[in-house]
Amino acid sequence: MEPVQTALAILLLPLASATVIALFLRTRGALASWISTGAAGVIAILSLQLILGGARNFPASWEWLKLGDLVISLGIKFDDLAALMLFVVSVVGFLIHVFSLGYMHDDQARARFFGGLSIFMFSMLGIVLADNLFMIFIFWELVGFSSYLLIGHWHEKSSAAEAAKKAFIVNRVGDFGFLLGILMCYWSNGTVNLTELTAMGAANQLALGAAIPLLLFCGAVGKSAQMPLQVWLPDAMEGPTPVSALIHAATMVAAGVYMLCRIHALMVFEALQIIMWVGTITALYAALCAIVQRDIKKVLAYSTLSQLGYMVAAFGLGAGWVSEGVKGGAMDVMRLAPDAAGVGAAMFHLTTHAFFKALLFLAAGSVIIGCHHEQDIFKMGGLWKKMPVTFVTFTIGVLAIIGMPGLAGFFSKDAILYLAMKNDTKVFAVLAFTAVLTAFYMVRMWKLVFLGEARDDHAKHAHETGLSMTLPLVLLAVLSVVGGWSAVFGKLAGSVAHLVPEAEGPVHTTILLVSLVVMTLGAGSALFFYQSAPTDSLEDKSRFAFSGLVWLKESFDRLYNYYVAKIQQRFAMLLNFLEQIFLAGLIIRGFAGFVGLVGYGARAFYTGSLHAYVYWFLLGAVLLWAFATGLL
Amino acid sequence: MIIGLNHYLLISAVLFALGFLGVLLRKNTLVIYMCLELMLIASTVALVAFSHFNDTLDGNVFVFFILTIAAAEVAVGLAIIVALFRQRHTVQVEELNQLKH
Amino acid sequence: MANLLFYTFTFLTLAGAALVVVNKNAVNAAMFLLLSLVGTAGLFVLLDAALLAFVLLLVYAGAVVALFLFIVMLLDTTPGAVKPFKPATIVAAAIGGVLLLVGVVSLHQRAQLPTAVTGAVSPTLKNYAEMLFTTYLLPVQVVGFLLLIAMLGVIVLSKKFADPEDAK
């Protein structure tokens, strides 16, 4: 099969699956789940074929809309970056589909869930394969819609419906900036095609300025939940756990980082500085909030936020240090160009994060099922005996995220820390401290969930989950281990792997030492500090620190609620009032009333008396005659 | 005094005005109809006068048509009035006013 | 001599018309219409259109006015029960009359038309027939068709429709 056909099949197969489910299989949950999972499987196979087949950058573009000079086309850009992302999306997606077979087995609305998963796969693959910014935007919105659909899957719960609404609206705020960025890019550069933009960037023909990349970054702020739009991601945990794994850990939230890498050519130094600091602050903030969470999924959500901050910071760190001299040797004109090392580090961490975060979420799902839908970690404990497979895979995931040498997360985190140390020491300090916190809260959760004695009845009678759920865990655990090795990642990522910064010599040793120290410090203090008790040890020992961290989390939500309730709502009421009076009342009813009046006036002529009509006739004849003789 | 075209046209105009005034003033439907006929006669006088003073016969031939039309119109119109009389038992125009709003 | 005849016939015509308008009795009005038609026929003779005068008398005076009289007497209206005019009607009628008068006067003042008579075309029957059957052939056919339709219409209109409720 031609690569174009394969790519199209990959893109359109989930759409077909979703259509079939939506039209015919609304009530047949089992069949819908098989179709969706089957489609995901075929996509995974085709993706592997396409990636390992080696076909890159084949031409595939179809003109869709032509409005004067503006031409919006749909096309596929399949370079190494897209291949890497495709691998992540399709393989992790397929494993999560398999997990959902078991997890959602008893759900009433199973068909709707799998239809939503298929639509999500379609939208996400659209973002991955898109070749121009308009197409990315279309699928961006579709992904937002799928997320809304899936977060609100249990829409009978008002908290789930609220969370879905919140996610969509907050994303929309970011998308507004994104759209402005696309329009400005088109206006300044004349094209939104990614290949053309990269070529223009290489030839120094781009209209440079911080506005375009920052506006486009707004989209990433919304989709990847950076500050200040990070409020939707913790609430999005209202959705089923597979949804949290697929959308809010591995793929959709990573779409923001992927998009940044795609538009790498548009970046300028000032924009990258801002991006770097936004990512760093998000990482630190989320890590601090994660320490005081009770819900197992919320801990993982804040962990995702933190790791996303790492990715964004890594992308932002790839600035400066590459100076280009003017041709001809005169070195007085130097330009700081964006260093593609940021792209490499960010994508590396994105890939490894997808593996171990999906693993962690799915294992958490397994734990939740095992404890009969209990999500509070203080009501768990002692599960290492009762759920061995889950325990082992979860442990591998925890070790990966805190940076145990040899596992995937270690290599990617090292790359980021190295990049930080090379470019900006302040950021390096913050990121290192955040790594300590990461180890701290992850080990806290691990200890409270799995070690010690069972603190609740459900935990006492927990049992291991079925094969459909444990098999994906095992496979993801394998990927978490090998995903960072250069043999594996190099094969998958091709040229992107070459962009990852590699430390050498004494710097390499320094970084290694820093990682080890950070990991031991965090893990050790957590193991030591937290007792397997039904209450939070931090709350017990230091009320002040605990409530301070809780306030940190609440403050954003409170601020936004205040704004919406007090300011925005009042403005909306004012507009409603004006609309009722002027538009509905004066203009619409006014016109209708005027026409009615004219009707009344015309009705008055119908007296029924012949003589009256003759008089009107005479008047008409006189007017005509006066007009004819020139009197009028 | 030589009788010229203007005199005949004046006769025609006065006849027409009298007919119109009759339509305005009379209340009996049949008399109104007669006044309509008066107006037609006025137009025939004007036509014949014109054709006489312009040395053609077109006006005269046209009068033939007018006579024919008038005859047909009277027949149908009177049939309508008779049918109306059967329904409403009156020919006073003021009482034939059912088509008001 | 010709002038005298002209004035006589004019007087007949206009007096007859005025009396049609004024007279309260419908039968009287019909008779005065007849008088007016006679005057007009005379005027036609003065205008060298004798054939038309006779046709006018035959068709108009003979058939149409006779029909009018038939219907007037058939409908048996009593001339006494006529309501007096409302003030609004009098005002409106006065205005209408003035307008018509102004129309007549202005027409008389503005018309500047030729008066010479040469008598080139003689109004014989042969000439009439020639015009009717060549130049005005189409109107003749159309008028014939129209007469047919009028006849049908009259037959339909005067048919008494048997109402089932009346029969009970």
Image (cartoon, coloured by chain):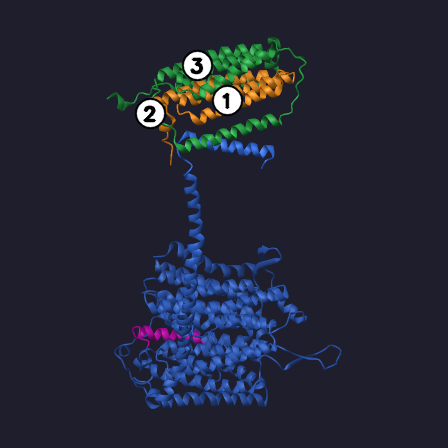
Chain colours: A blue, B orange, C green
Question: Residue A629, image x and y in percent?
Answer: 60, 32
Q: Is residue A401 visible?
A: yes
Task: Find disc 2 in the rendering and name its residue.
Answer: B88
Residue type, mark 1 in image: Met
Residue identifier under label 1: B39
Whether residue A484 is visible here, answered yes or no, is no
- Kindly give the residue lying farthest to the left in the view shown: C168
Of residue B96 and residue A323, the one placed in the foreground of this image is: B96
Residue appearing at x 54%, y 16% in the figure: C10
Labels 2 and 3 within one chain: no
State whether residue A322 is above or below residue B14.
below
Is C143 left or right of C111, judged from the image as shown?
left
Three-letter residue code for mark 2:
Arg
Q: Where does label 3 land, which residue?
A: C31
Give me the chain letter of mark 3.
C
> Neighbour class for label 3 at 10 Å: few (<14), some, many (≥20)?
some
Q: Nearer the viewer, residue A22 or A162?
A: A162
- Displayed quadrant of residue A296: bottom left
Name the element at disc 2.
helix
Label 1 resides on the chain identified as B
Name the quadrant containing residue A106.
Answer: bottom left
Between residues A143 and A525, which one lies in front from this camera angle? A143
- Going by the numbered disc 3, the residue's amino acid type is Met
* Residue stretch rendered in magenta on the structure: A356-375
Q: Mark 2, residues whose alpha carbon is within 10 Å: few (<14), some, or many (≥20)?
A: few
Q: Position of residue C47 (x, y in %)?
A: 60, 13
